Amino acid sequence: MASADTTELTLDCSDIDQHLGKPIESSPMREPFGNNDFRRWVQAMHYPNLLHFDRFYAAESRWGKLVAPQSVAVVMDDGHGTAPSCVGKIPGSHLLFGGDEWWFEDVQVYAGDTISNERIPFDYAVKNTGFAGPTCFQRGDNFFRNQRGELIVKQRSTAIRYLAHVGGAKTNMDDAEEPVWSDQEIAALEDRKFTWIQMLHDLGHKERWWDDVNVGDQLPERVFGPHTVASFTTEWRSYMFSVWGTLDRREINLEDFGFSKEMAGHENSPVMERINPELTDGAYYGASRGHLFPRWARTIGMPRSYGYGASMGAWVIDYFAGWAGEWGMVTHASANYRGPALSGDITVMTGTVLGKHVDEAGRHIIEVDCRMTNQKGGVQATATAEIRLPKKWYNTSRRGQCGQ
């Protein structure tokens, strides 16, 4: 492992102050969502919930048609949720996702809906970390609304901004090689994966009753991977902003935020998109290409290709929402990203019921946690959530029993 002396380093974050509390420009959708946008998203997020991609199953659901997963909001705007937590110039810096917090309203998203996003930088703090010395933890808020002005969800994202050369110097090259999985190990993984999928099938259109959940209950294990450059690319392409012509893009130059020229380029530039759109694609050039190319990953502190922080946030929401079923809903969740999903690794998600209560609005709430690890037990993320589940009212008809 390379080393870097961080004792005398400073991180100039003074430019951030002028942006706090002031809305920044967004990149609106040009066309409404279609069902295939939802299908592409859940496929990329490894979320095989029939509600979101199978029209025959969805027709028999409480909504009577395909509905978007709760995690869909970050699909539409550039920056996949982190734009308001990346304002102000920090010279020589790079950015990683640090986590997010979500407050959901009871508003569904369907094909034909258009989402807009009001983005407001919130705050920041500088701390010393073992990874990169002085590090800025910056937060910003996204307010996602539909075409009727209804708030769908508020997301508070956290960005980790640090000196890129320091992160690069501390890249752990002991982790440069991907693990090798035998055919037998892959077969065993597929069996583990299907356990969670079978849970979705078993619950089907039925309720998961608040009454039947107990403190200490374990949520089913969810496994996916091994992650690959192909799976990371599939994730990237499921974000609407990664596709040419989908947004009215804001004019942006990542060098204005302190990114190096080779990690900035023309990513997301609306001008260059009309001249040579390949140069605007973060899969090939710019700040995002470290996810797919080990050479560029190592310049900012990652030993090999790695997954997207926004995808980890979606994995958390989908894990809780899939367990809750179509009659439940995630009302609040908070996730901290501790380590990347590296190529060749798997992701294992587990959870525990921590408590249950009735909130001030009379909703019956289950409190849960989640731990996301790789095959060696290395922590990728931790999270907590509150999930609304239906309460049995013991009326004569089954659907009459369903309350909140």
Image (cartoon, rainbow, N blue to C red):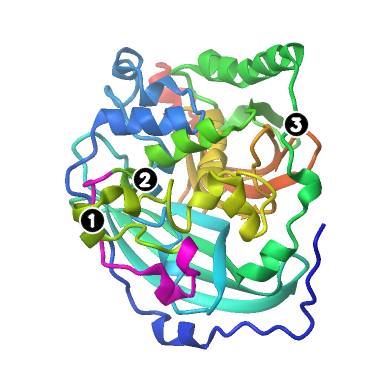
Residue under label 3: 179
Residue 267 percent coordinates (x, y): 36, 58
Q: Answer with left or right where residue 170 lies relative to residue 60.
A: right
Indicate yes or no whether the magenta region holds residue 254.
Answer: yes
Question: Quick one: SS at disc 2?
Answer: helix
Residue under label 1: 28
Mark 3 packing: few (<14 Cα in 10 Å), some, or many (20+)?
some
Residue type marked 3? Pro
Residue 162 percent coordinates (x, y): 62, 71
Q: Kindly indicate whether the residue at mark 1 contacts the one at mark 2 (C-beta within 8 angstroms).
A: no
Question: Quick one: SS at disc 1?
Answer: loop
Q: Looking at the image, can residue 32 be seen?
A: yes
Decide which of tag 3 and tag 2 comes sooner along the chain.
2
Find the magenta span and give its range: 244-263
Which quadrant of the view contains residue 236?
top left
| Foreground pick, 177 / 188 | 177
Give the residue drawn at x 35%, y 69%.
Answer: 253
| Foreground pick, 291 / 323 | 291
Residue type marked 1? Pro
Q: Where is 182 relative to 32, above or below?
A: above
Q: Where is 399 relative to 298, above or below?
A: above
Residue type marked 2? Val
**Residue 75 - label:** 2
Give the residue drawn at x 44%, y 27%.
Answer: 43
Which quadrant of the view contains residue 316?
top right
Residue 390 percent coordinates (x, y): 49, 33
Q: CA distance from mark 2 to mark 1?
A: 11 Å
Decide which of tag 3 and tag 1 comes sooner along the chain.
1
Q: Where is 325 relative to 331, above or below?
A: above
